[in-house]
Amino acid sequence: MENGLANLNLRIDFRSETPITTQIVEQIQNRVLSGELKPGDQLPTVRQLATELRVNFNTVARAYRILDSMGLISTQQGRGTYIWSAGQAENRERERRQALELLTRHYLRDALALGFSADQIRAVLEEEIEQLNKLHSDNP
């Protein structure tokens, strides 16, 4: 942390089909889930992060609102935005579930964009799950 603020080191890919808001949300969420960002860490202001990333402040504000609705951050009027203290197991599991859902949505969107049908995607997923189960049963 520098100057009391978490150093996010976010990387935005302006050529990506993934919206910038989503990129910001995913990167902050991943840092929270990995423990890189800890409860109580203060995030930069919307304007500070927008300036650092060279994006519109409304984009960062939208990302912060999404993170807040996910329960990952808390904005305290006049004090700043902080990583939420989610020490309870059920909150951690909810965060993990949300991360999985986000990964799944991106996977599905990418597969559909490549022209695969829902049935083709389902078949591949079932095969991959079967392979994972086999690997886990062979290596307990």
Image (cartoon, rainbow, N blue to C red):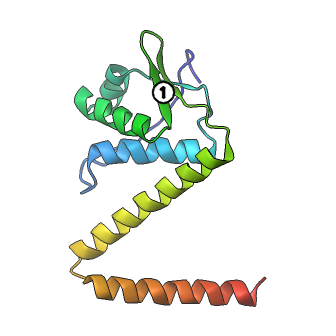
- Tell me the quadrant of the picture where the N terminus can be found: top right
- What residue is drawn where x is 63% and y is 85%? 133
Residue 56 visible: no
The front one of 50 and 84 is 84
Whether residue 105 is visible: yes
Q: How many marks?
A: 1
Most extreme residue toward the front, as rendered? 90
Q: Is 121 above or below relative to 65?
A: below
Secondary structure at numbered mark 1: strand
What is the x, y in percent for residue 76? Answer: 46, 17
Comparing 92 with 83, the one in front is: 92
Residue furthest to the right in view is 140
Residue at position x 40%, y 43% in the image: 25
Residue 116 place in picture, x, y as percent: 25, 83
**Residue at the (28%, 44%) spot, across then down:** 20
Image quarter where the C terminus lies is: bottom right
**Eyeballing the image, is 5 above or below 104?**
above
Residue picked out by circle 1: 74
Question: In the figure, is residue 37 to the left or right of 52?
Answer: right
Disc 1 residue crowd, few under 14, some 14–19, many 20+, Cα 10 Å? many
Q: Amino acid at mark 1?
A: Ser
Q: Is residue 8 above or below residue 102?
A: above
| 29 lies above or below 113 | above
